Amino acid sequence: MTRHIRDILTLAGFLFAATLLSGCKGCAQEDDEAKIRALIEKGRTLSEEHDVKGVMDLATKDFTAVPQGMTRQEVSVTLLMAFRKYEDFTIHFPRPSVTVEPSKTEAQANITFIVVRRGEAVPDLGSLVDDPQTWLAKASKIADPYELKLWLVKEDGEWKANRAQLSGMRSLEDL
């Protein structure tokens, strides 16, 4: 094999490897986003099942709710009170926005959602998951929307919520 052909094959091999690696980096980013969205879905399911421990297992040991500075234990009690107040409910939200930091060890997710008593009529919000503005306009006619901001960290390869901020929720006295 001539040196020229070998150089071309080597260059082609490097380009192919670079393409694969750059694709894999994108895949890793998408995988992280998909994992975070799956974590959010799991949180919805556990919440609808009133599984406070399960929800808290999705959080780090040093989890806090800001700006109140609520500890993990205080958040557990708040969730228990909210689950009792709302009783049998469903949670609806459009596709959460997820931003994974370049370090791939930290991320942020924003979820706008409504809580509706199970069995209550809910217009077709599922078709609007990729249109958050229209989803919010339609959902606001059914229930008061909340916004949940999550700061996440990767621990041992798994994403966990480290901080949360909930807006639109009534005070604890209303629970």
Image (cartoon, rainbow, N blue to C red):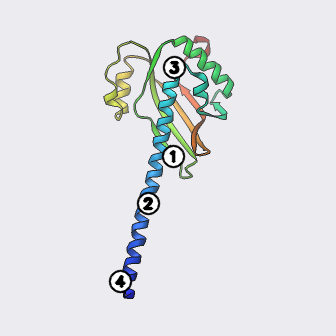
Q: Are marks 2 and 1 in contact (CB under 8 Å)?
A: no
Query: Compared to 149, does 168 lie above or below?
Result: above
Q: Nearer the viewer, mark 2 or mark 4?
A: 4
Q: Is residue 43 left or right of residue 20?
A: right
Which numbered dot is residue 5?
Answer: 4
Closer to the N terminus: mark 2 or mark 4?
4
Crowding at mark 1 (Cα within 10 Å: few <14, some 14-19, many 20+): some
Mark 2 element type:
helix
Closer to the N terminus: mark 3 or mark 4?
4
The residue to which callout 3 is attached is 49
Mark 1 element type:
strand
**What is the three-letter code of the residue carrying label 4?**
Ile
Crowding at mark 3 (Cα within 10 Å: few <14, some 14-19, many 20+): some
Of residues 28 and 68, the one nearer the viewer is: 28
Residue 70 visible to the viewer:
no
Mark 4 element type:
helix
**What is the three-letter code of the residue carrying label 2?**
Ser
**What is the three-letter code of the residue carrying label 3?**
Glu
Query: Compared to 59, does 171 lie above or below?
Result: above
The residue to which callout 1 is attached is 100
Crowding at mark 4 (Cα within 10 Å: few <14, some 14-19, many 20+): few
Query: In percent of the image, x 57 and y 52: which residue is there?
Result: 103
Query: In percent of the image, x 59 and y 20: which residue is there?
Result: 79
Closer to the N terminus: mark 1 or mark 4?
4
Q: Are marks 3 and 4 in contact (CB under 8 Å)?
A: no
Which numbered dot is residue 22?
Answer: 2
Q: Are marks 3 and 2 in contact (CB under 8 Å)?
A: no
Q: CA distance from mark 2 to mark 1?
A: 17 Å
Closer to the N terminus: mark 1 or mark 3?
3
**What is the three-letter code of the residue carrying label 1?**
Val
